[in-house]
Amino acid sequence: MALLGNQLCVAINSHMRVYDLSDPTNPVLYSLLPINSQIYDIESDGEYLYLLANGFKVYDTSDSGNVQQIGSTQFSGTQFVLKGPRAFIAGNNSLRAVDISNPNLPVNLGYVFSNLYIHWIEANENLIVGTTDFRERLEFIDVSDPTLPVLLQPSESRSWFVANSLALNSTHAFVKNLFEIFIRLTSATLQMSNSWIA
């Protein structure tokens, strides 16, 4: 789901629903948009709606009753994160940086390949952190120059650790472990070392 002002955009399989939340106690379905492909991720920057579904797509929802696709690329993936005028798309053993300063014309800036499949991702100013393959470790990607993302030393692997949620600030990655009954946050330093802090 993604919020855009008084609108709630909900991805359901291969459809996107746009609701008017002017009265939050009575959401009104304004638009039902067939995407004709599985929707993997959906985000908003407060002005436009972005989604991954057989490519990276940009929608203008300013007219709730007439949602329009205004831009797209063929870059596929399973998750993305927005950071300023850029989108970072993960999937297919790679991470790609896309310039979205002109939402009508998203432009590829650069990409990097990984030996591992990147799952959940989060971003701060200069770094992308993602969980990998069986989500037993973290991958660090320096995106200070988005035209040349650099794959850094990953964290050590933890066979008992299966990350299913990730948050990031300027110094630490906070990871929730799927196999623990109570949510336990562990941190991996963002100094590109292999150490984990309990």
Image: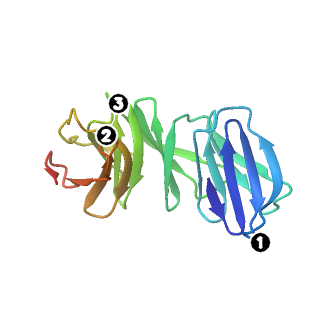
How many numbered callouts? 3
Residue 4 visible in this rendered orientation of the protein = yes
State whether residue 46 is above or below residue 40: below
Secondary structure found at label 2: loop
Give the residue number, with chain letter if any, for mark 2. Answer: 179
Q: Earlier in the sequence, mark 2 or mark 1?
A: 1
Determine the CA span between mark 1 and mark 3. 41 Å
Secondary structure found at label 1: loop
Residue 136, x across and y down, in percent: 27, 36
Mark 2, residues whose alpha carbon is within 10 Å: few (<14), some, or many (≥20)?
few
Give the residue number, with chain letter if any, for mark 1. Answer: 22
Q: Look at discs 2 and 1 and give the one toward the viewer.
A: 2
Give the residue number, with chain letter if any, for mark 3. Answer: 133
Badge 2 amino acid: Phe
Residue 104 visible in this rendered orientation of the protein = no
Badge 3 amino acid: Asp
Q: Look at discs 1 and 3 and give the one toward the viewer.
A: 1
